Amino acid sequence: MVILTDVSQASSSANDHKFDVFLSFRGVDTRLSFTNHLHKALVNANLTTFLDDKEIDTGLFLKPELESAIRASRASIIVLSKNYATSTWCLNELVLILEQLRTSNHIVIPIFYHVEPTDVRKQQNSFKNSMEKHEERMKAETNAENKSEWARKIAIWKKALTQVADLKGMNAKGRIETEIIDETVDAIYQRLGEPLRKTMPLLIGMDDSIKLITSWLKDGSSHTTDILTIYGMGGIGKTSLANYVHKLHGHEFDKSYFIEHISRRCAQQFNGLLHVQKQLCSNISNHAPNVLECTSMIETALKRKKFFLVLDDIDSLEQLDALLGKEGFYPGSKIIITTKDASLTERCALFNMQIQTKHKLHFLGGLEDTKSLQLLSTHAFMCDKPKEDYVEVSIELLQYCEGLPLALEVLGRYLRNRDLAYWKDCIESLKKGTNSHINNVLKMSYDTLGSDYDKELFKHIACFFVGQDRDFTEIILKACNFNTTTGITHLVDRCLLSIGSNNKLTMHSLIQMMGRDVVRQESPNMPWKRSRLWCHEESFKVLRQKKGEGNLLGLALDMKMLEKEKLFELQTDSLSGMDNLMLLQLNHVQMNDQSCKNFPEELRWLCMHGFPLKYIPSELPMENLVVLDMSHSNIESFGMSFVNNQQQVKRKQLLTGSLSKNERLLVSLKILDFTFCEQLCSLGGFFKLPALERLILTNCTSLIHVCESIEHCVELVLVDLRSCYKLKRLPRTIGKLNKVEKLLLDGCDLGNSRIEMRDMDSLQTLKADKFGRNSQTSSSATVEVIPRDLHSFTISLPSSLVILSLKYSRLSNESFPMDLSCLSMLRDLYLDGNPIVSMPSCVRSLTRLKQLSMNYCKKLKTVEQPPHTLRILRITNMSGWQCNYRNLLRQICFNPEMSPLKLHMHMQLYENSSFEIQGMIKIQPLADVKERVLRNLGWTDLESIKKQKVHTSHMLREAQTSHVQMYYEFGIFSTFYAGKVIPNWITHTRWGSSISIIIPSSRNKLRGLNICSVQTLKRIQSKPYQGIPYQKIVKVIDYSQVPVKFFEMPMIIVSNITKNHTWIYNHYISQVSVAEECVILLSHWMLGKNEMEDGDQLTVTIAKKAGEEDPLRYYKSWNHIIGGDLSAFQSTTGEYVLHRVQFRDTLSKEIPEYYHPFIAHNAAYKGRGYGVCVLTWNTGQLLDHGFPSTRNNINGVLLLHWPELWGLQLLTGPKKTHAESHRKQMFTAEDEEENETWSVENEDKYAYWRAKDEEENTTWSDEDEEENTTLRDEDEDKKCYLEL
C-alpha cells in the first residue's frame, strides 16, 4: 500500500480522529440485523467505522477501548432500540457521546429503532422498565459508596436519555430499513463534509492518476456504464490509488462498493469467490448454494441503482464473470478494476454481450526519482528529503527500487532510525536477493500464470534475455520449444515484461530478481542442481569443479564480470555432464582446440564473445545451433568449399581449419554474428547455411571478401556490413535473394561505382549509351552498382529491400541512375555523409518511400520534389550548435501532391540570402526578382537599391553580408535597405508608430497591402552606444574597421477591426545593418478574397490589379499565406501569428509536427504545447516581458491596429505572457483626428497605455496603480509611411 499520512501536518485532527463513525447499539436487539447492515453500508461508503464486536455488559464503567474509540471518532450513530437502556455500557457510551457533542463538535445522529422518541425522553415503556431494574440493583447494593455511585449514574443516564431524544434523528417505525440506512449514510457524509477529505491519506506521486480518474468519473454519458482498468506490476500502488479515489467520490453515487484483495481471498479461502460475492451483494443469503446463483443475484442488484464499484486485484476471468455477470448495469454507473493482467477486462463475458459499455485502460508505472526520494524519505526519515549524510545511500536505494512504491515503503520503514553503516550493509544484501515481503507480492503475478510453459519462458527471459531484442529472443526460444508469440504477450499483459524502445525486452529489476529467486529456490545451496545459472561466480565454480548436471538448461559466464580476474581455461570435460544445455554464454573464456569436444549437442544459442582461437574447431557441435554469436573474437575466416557452376572452379576456404570431409550442413542456424571481429578477412560457405536469416558483420574492419555462395541463403532478411571499411566488393549474387529487407552498407567504399538496373536471370549487365537511360528488365531485375573501370566491382541490390543504408559510402550524384522503381518495397533510405550535391533523381521513383535521410551531406545544395509518399526528411549538417564549414543548401522544393511531412532540419541551415523552403520561406536577391512581379506588388523605381549590401543575422548564425534580398513567407513580400527617402509611389504617410483608416469604396478589388517604415539611429560618437536606446542596438562588430549598427527587426501587426482579424508578423531576419543611419523596411501583404473589404477599418495600401496573366500565381499557390490556410497559425479567433517558429521548434534540431507546404494540416501547431506567437527568432524565447518591453521590441513598426493585441491568448503552451496571466482584459481603440488611444482594464492590475501623435511626437505612457510607475518613451526619429 502506498497510502501514507502527510507527515508535514502536525495538527491533531488526523491523529485524534481515528474513526469517522462510532456505532452505539444494543447487541441483543440489532447486532445481527439492522446494525450489521448499517455497518456494511458505512464501510462501503468508505467511512471508517468502529463497531464493538465483543460486547460484554458488566460494570458501571466504560471499558477504556470504547472510551478511546468514541473520543477518536468524528461522529456517532446511536441505535436506540427496545433494550438499549438495559445495558450500562450503552448508557455510559451515550453519556460520553453527548459530552463529546458539547465539547468538541461531535456529530450525533440517533436512530429510534422501533421505539418512540417520547418513550426515550420520558423513560416510558421499555425504557421505564430498564431504569427501574437499574434502581433495583442500586437498592440491593450494600456498599454505601457503590450505592451512591449507582444513584449518580442513574441520574446522569436519565438526563442523557432526555437529551438524546431531543436531537434530530431517524425514526424507523413503519419504514423500510434500507431507506433509513441510506439516509443515515447520506446525513453523515453531508455533516462531515469537506473535513472528511482533509483526513484522507496522501498518495505521493499519484497526482496525475488521481486527476485522470477523477475526470473519468465525472465525464461520460448517463446512458452507459464506464469501466476503467488500472493495471501495473505488483506493489505499484493500484489498490492504494483505487481506494483513495473511491473514498473521495464514493458518496456521489447511489451505491458504492470497494471489494479488496479479491485474488488473494479467492486463493486462501474455501469458497473464497462466494465470500467475495456476498460482500458485494448484501442481499445474498449466507446459505446461497453456489457462485452461479450468487452471480444472478448480483446482476439483479447492480441493475437497480447507479453505483460506483471497485474490484481490487482481479486475476482471472472467472472472478470478473462472477462479480460483473453479463446483464449490464444501471446507466451512469462506474466500475474500476485493478489487475496485473491488462487483457482480462475485455475478455470477460460482459464484453461478449450487446451492452453499452465503455472501457478505458490506465497503466500505472513507477514513480519518478523526485517522488521516489520523497516517499522513501517519508518512511525512513519522517520528512520530505533524506538527511544530509544519507543522500548518497538513498539515491543508491532508489536505483534498486526503480520507482516501485511498495519497495520504497517497506525498505524505508525497515531502515528508519538505522545508522549509515546499516544502510550500506542492507543495500549490499539486497543486491544478492530481494526482500521477502516485496518478493512475495511480486511473485503473485508469476503464480497466476496459467501455463507452466509461460512460467518457464519467464524464467528464461529473467535469467538471460532482459535487454535483448525481442525478435532475437523469440528466434532462440522458439528453438527451445516455447510458443514465444503468445507467451511473451501473456507476460506483457501481466506486467511481468514490457517491450521497450527499439523492440528491447525490459523488466523491472525487482521482477527480474524475483524470477531468478524462483530458480534459486530449486536448489538454494547447490547451484549445479538448478535449471539455470546466470551468476558468473556460480557458473565459474560449476565449470571449474565440473559439477554440471543434466537438468541444467542455460548457463552464462563472462570472465570480465568476475570481481577478481581469474585464470581459467575451459577443460574438455567441463560441460560433459550437461546433456540438456540449450543456452550457453562463455564470454572471454580461454580455451584450446580440444575444449569444444564435449559441448552439448542440444545447444541452440552459443555466445562466445572474445573467442581466442583464429578458427572454429571442427569438434564444436553446431547442427542444432540457431544463433552463433562470436563478437569481438580473434577468428580470421569462416567458410566452406564452394563450387562456382558457371566457371566450374572449385574454391576451398577454411572452415575450422579442416578439409571438406569435416564440413557440416547447419540447417538450423538463423543468426550469425561476427560484430567487431577485426581479424576476420573472409566469409564463405553459405550454401551450408540454408536457414540463415541474419548476417551481422558490423565493424569487421579487415573483411575484404564475402563469398558468392550467399545466394543459397534464401531466408536471409538482414545483411549488416556497417563499418567494413576495407570491403570494396559485395557478392554479385546477393541481388538474387528475394527476402532481404534490410541492407546496411554504411562506410563501404562505393565511390568508384554506379547503381544501375540489372537482370539477374541472365547475369548480364544491360549496357546503355549514356548513364541514366531507362532499361527494360525481367521480373527478377535488381539494382547493381556498375564499375567505372575494370578495377572496380559490381553490386546488386535485392528488389525486396525495405531499408537501405548507404551512409558514408562516397556515393556522388553520378553513382545513381534515373530510375530505382525496381526497389518498389523500399521504405527507408539513408544517404548520410555522401558527397551528393542534390537529392538523386532516382529517389522520386521510390513509390513507397517514407523516410529519406541526407544528414551531413556537406555538398548538398538542393532537394527537389521528393516522393509524395515521404513522411520524414532529415537534413542536418552539424551535431551541435556550431558549424565549422559553410552550408551550401539553398533550396527545398516539394511535390504539390505531397503528404504531411516531418522535416528534421537544424536551424543553422536556414540561410540569410538566396534560400528557399517551398511553402515556408523564399529568399532571393531583389535584383533577380522579375520586374513584372515587382510591378504587381506596386513596387517601382527600386533600381538604385538592388546593388546595396546589407548585413543580416537570424537565430544563432553569425551576421552575413549580401545584396538586398526579397523575402517571402506567409503571403508577405518584404525587403529592407539603407535610405532616408521613401519611394515616390507612397501616397499616404504619417509620423508615428501606427495609423488607422477606413477602406474607401472602389471599383477595383482590394488585393494587397504595402507597408513602409523607417528606423533611424543617431550618429555614433566616440562612444558607440552613447545616446542610442538599448533596444535599437543589438551589437556593434568590426567589418573593415567600420562600425556596423544592427537594428532589431520589428514586429508587424495588422488588424482588421471590423472583422476582428489580427496578424502578428515576426520577420525571418532578426537583425539588420546597413551602411547608413536609416533602414527602410518595405513589405507587401497579399490578401485573400474576404480578408479586407470596403468599409473595413484598418491600415492598408491599395494596389491596382494588372490586366495581364497574374505574375504572382506561383507565390499565391503556397498554402500558408494570407487568404490561404493559416489555421495552424491561429492563436485565438481572428488572430494569426505569422512566424516560421510555427513551422518548427527553434530550440530543437527537429520539426516535431507534420509540415506541408500546400495541403492544409490543421493539427500542425494549433493547440500544441508550444509558444505559437510573439517569439524572437534569434533566441527562440517567448516574449513574456509584458507590454512596455514588447512595445520597445516593435519600435519603429507600423502598428496598424491592435484591439486585442496584448489580450489575445497568444500562447498555447506552458509558458505564458504577462498579459495571458490576467483573467480579463478589455481593449478599446479610438481614432480621432490622427490620435489613437488604447486602454486596458484588468482585474489583477489596472493599467492603461495611451498613445498620442502630436506634432510628429510619439508618446507612450504606462500607468500601474499597484506599482505607481510611469514609463515614457519618446522618439522623434521614427516615421511610418503607408500607401492608400
Image (spheres, rainbow, N blue to C red):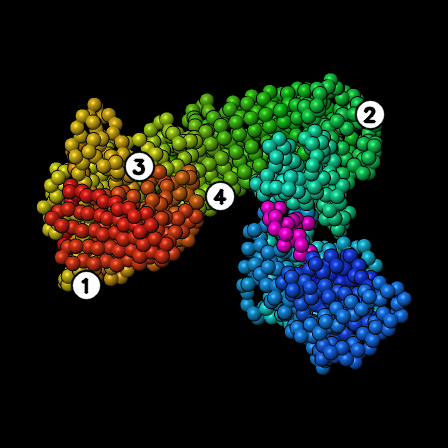
Q: Is residue 212 left or right of residue 953?
A: right
Distance between the alpha carbons at the discs numbered 3 and 1? 38 Å
- Compare marks 4 and 3 and give the one earlier in the sequence: 4
Asked if residue 667 is positioned above or below residue 66 in the image, the reply reads above
Q: Amino acid at mark 4?
A: Arg
Q: Quadrant location of residue 941?
A: top left
* Camera-side residue of 456 and 1257: 1257
Disc 2 + disc 1, Cβ < 8 Å = no
Q: Is residue 449 visible?
A: yes
Q: Secondary structure at mark 3?
A: loop
Distance between the alpha carbons at the discs numbered 4 and 1? 54 Å
Residue occupied by mark 3? 954
> In the picture, which quadrant includes the C terminus?
bottom left
Task: Work out which residue is located at the far bottom of the displayed protein and give it.
Answer: 174
Asked if residue 579 is positioned above or below residue 1007 in the image, the reply reads above
Residue 546, numbered circle: 2
Q: Position of residue 384 (x, y in %)?
A: 59, 41
Residue occupied by mark 1? 1095
- Compare marks 4 and 1 and give the one earlier in the sequence: 4
Asked if residue 999 is positioned above or below residue 793 in the image, the reply reads below
Disc 3 + disc 1, Cβ < 8 Å = no
